[in-house]
Amino acid sequence: MDSIEPVDTMVIGAGQAGLATGFHLKKRGQDFLILDSQARIGDVWRNRWDSLRLFTPAQHDSLPGQPFPATRGSFPAKDAMADYLEDYAKNWELPVSHGVQVTGVERADGKFKIQSSTGSFLAKNVVVATGANARPRIPAGAGALDPAIHQLHGAEYSNPEAIPPGDVLVVGSGTSGVEIAVELASSHRTYIAGTPPFHVPGPVLRYAGGLWWFMIHHALTRSTPMGRKVATDFTQHGAPLIRTSVKELEVAGVTRLPRLAGARDGQPLLQDGRTLPVATVMWASGYQPDFGWIRGLPEDEHGWPATSRGAVEQLPGLFFVGLPFQYGLTSGLVGGVGRDAEHVAGLIASRATRELAT
């Protein structure tokens, strides 16, 4: 692509956030294009570990306008989610360009120049919908471990058969860490380090899910005092345990340990001063923001984009959808991202209307 291709609104990312945004932009008659770095919609889900299931039941896993095709109360597998996203884009005829890696976004002369692996674009609006899992978070002390210790992040994990023989330490006791530890315990002596967050009991999701969803979707938002308090805890400590529990660790025979403090003599060092000789360390330590490719982007104290319900006020025309607790606790969930997408699409449509009036 030698010339700069113009488009009214560019959506970066064709995951749940990007597709929901596309749905609402199309509903408002807006001109837009979705860029996706993957070869196929849903590949991000297909590439996760083999046994992964969604943490929320099927009735809360729908994008706008299309129910998730699964039994109420069931937890869909990752490939089912991937296929649903692919079908969603096809069903609503959303314009998606695949295999395009965006490398830079810069605002100039009231528009945005977007640099990518296939060329450059010029857009009036940009919606960043790349999600919260851009870059795996690995503690700095990882480099001090003995090179003989096999290390990998949860994003690289596929199944227990791919893990070398020997003891395994899972670092991080969120939902993903707990689920991976329980699975590994069937074939490896497994330890898990960290303090588990608050646990949402399974029956609450399965049988009282409507009430629970109403609570987390409508009450826990940045518009309520309680929601603002939860938002602070959420960004500092992470999401609660969903669908799995500490009890499952005990049943599986996983040994719980204090937090990891670093390394001593090449071995993992725990906060209580003990070292733990293991063959593998699995980093279930979450992800961190990676938006350095957006020039001039203001950030909050945690490194996330500073927005007002997804709008970057310092860079008019730049928006985000799918950030953790962007507006509410469900902002990063499949079933909750549509609310933020609708809000952002409305802001873009309003900008277009004002432009026509001037």
Image (tube, rainbow, N blue to C red):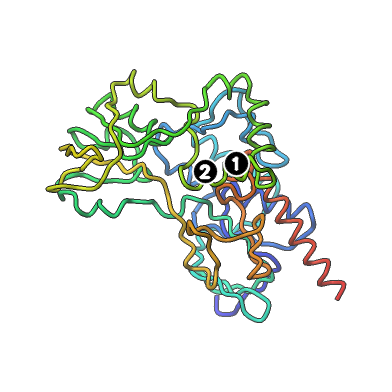
Where 225 sits versus 8, above or below?
Answer: above
Q: CA distance from mark 1 to mark 2?
A: 8 Å
* Mark 1 or mark 2: whose residue is earlier in sequence: 2
Residue 128 visible in image:
yes
Residue 278 visible in image:
no
Residue 233 is situated, as x and y percent measured from the top left of the image, at: 51, 43
Residue 298 is situated, as x and y percent measured from the top left of the image, at: 55, 67
Q: Amino acid at mark 1?
A: Leu
Assign the N terminus to one quadrant of the image.
Answer: bottom right
Residue 176 is situated, as x and y percent measured from the top left of the image, at: 41, 36
Where 333 sits versus 145, above or below?
Answer: above
Q: Residue at x 49, y 59 (%)?
A: 301
Q: Residue at x 42, y 41 (%)?
A: 48
Q: Are marks 1 and 2 in contact (CB under 8 Å)?
A: yes
Neighbours of disc 2 within 10 Å: few (<14), some (14-19), many (20+): some
Q: Secondary structure at mark 2?
A: helix
Marking on residue 199: none
Residue assigned mark 2: 234
Assign the C terminus to one quadrant of the image.
Answer: bottom right
Q: Residue at x 63, y 64 (%)?
A: 312
Q: Amino acid at mark 2?
A: Phe
Q: Nearer the viewer, mark 1 or mark 2?
A: 2
Q: Which residue is situated farthest in the left direction here?
A: 265
Residue 354 located left or right of residue 114: right
Marking on residue 329: 1
Foreground pick, 58 / 213: 213
